[in-house]
Amino acid sequence: SGIEKAGIPIVQISAVPNVAQMVGVNRILRGQTVTCVVGNSVLTPAQEEDLRRKYVNRALKILTTKVDGPTIFTLEGTA
């Protein structure tokens, strides 16, 4: 992406990682669903807050990961 070309790493959280790959995003974190990318409406509010916190923490860790082209990550590792 243009931001990364300027030397600033980014992580895109997406429920449709193939689209992010097609536009050249290098660090992609697979989200939950299109309607609720980093949440889950079935969870209690406290559980959902915990899930969202996990996504943010995982994205921060991915920012420091060296990649060679588009790479899809999950909360647990790489896809």
Image (spheres, rainbow, N blue to C red):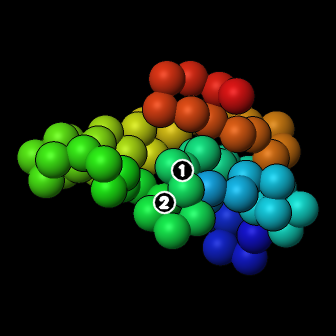
Q: Which residue is mark 1?
A: 31
- Taking the view exactly as shown, the residue that stands out farthest to the left is 46
In this picture, is 52 found above or below 54?
Answer: below
Q: Are marks 2 and 1 in contact (CB under 8 Å)?
A: yes
Q: Which residue is mark 2?
A: 37
Report the side of 64 relative to 4 (left or right).
Answer: left
- Taking the view exactly as shown, the residue that stands out farthest to the top is 77
Pick the front one: 21 or 35: 35
Quadrant of the frame with the C terminus: top right
Residue 19 picture quarter = bottom right
Instruction: Mark yes or no: residue 27 visible.
Output: yes
Residue 42 is situated, as x and y percent measured from the top left of the image, at 30, 48
Residue at screen point 73% across, 53% down:
17
In this picture, is 14 found above or below 59?
Answer: below
Q: Secondary structure at mark 2?
A: loop
Residue 4 is situated, as x and y percent measured from the top left of the image, at 68, 65
Residue 51 numbered tag = none
Residue at screen point 62% across, 56% down:
15
Mark 2 vs mark 1, CA separation in Å: 5 Å
Q: Amino acid at mark 1?
A: Gly
